[in-house]
Image: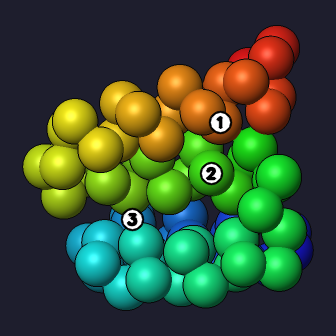
Amino acid sequence: MRGELQTGRDLIQSGRVETAIERTRAARKSAPQDGEMLGLLGAALEACGRSTEAVETLRKARTLVPNS
């Protein structure tokens, strides 16, 4: 899962945000309670201008990783 996180970060940094969203959503299927992965999804959503969805996603991630 850590490799998927790095891949997602790399995709966002290289401007391939939609691909990062797709890959992150796919990775979450095997670990739906992974707050760090959900946080990455929120960051990707924000990066592509989907602010409302990003805020909702980041709030949920915060409940899974309360000290983040």
- Give the residue type at disc 2: Leu
- Marks 2 & 3, CB-CB < 8 Å contact: no
Q: Secondary structure at mark 1?
A: helix
Q: Secondary structure at mark 2?
A: helix
Q: Closer to us: mark 2 or mark 3?
A: 2
Quadrant in the picture for residue 26? bottom right
Please state the horizontal and vertical placement of residue 52, each as a whole percent of the image.
22, 36
Q: Which residue is mark 2?
A: 38
Please state the horizontal and vertical placement of residue 25, each as a whole percent of the image.
55, 75
Quadrant in the picture for residue 68? top right
Q: Which residue is mark 1?
A: 61
Tell me: 37 left or right of 33.
left
Q: Quadrant of the N terminus?
A: bottom right
Instruction: Report how far apart the C-alphas of labels 2 and 3 lie in the structure.
Output: 17 Å
- Give the residue type at disc 1: Ala
In primary-sequence order, the first of circles 2 and 3 is 3
The label on residue 13 is 3
Instruction: Report how far apart the C-alphas of labels 1 and 3 lie in the structure.
Output: 21 Å
Compare residues 64 and 5 and report the one nearer the observer. Answer: 64
Compare residues 33 and 67 and report the one nearer the observer. Answer: 33
Q: Secondary structure at mark 3?
A: helix
Q: Residue at x 60, y 33 (%)?
A: 60
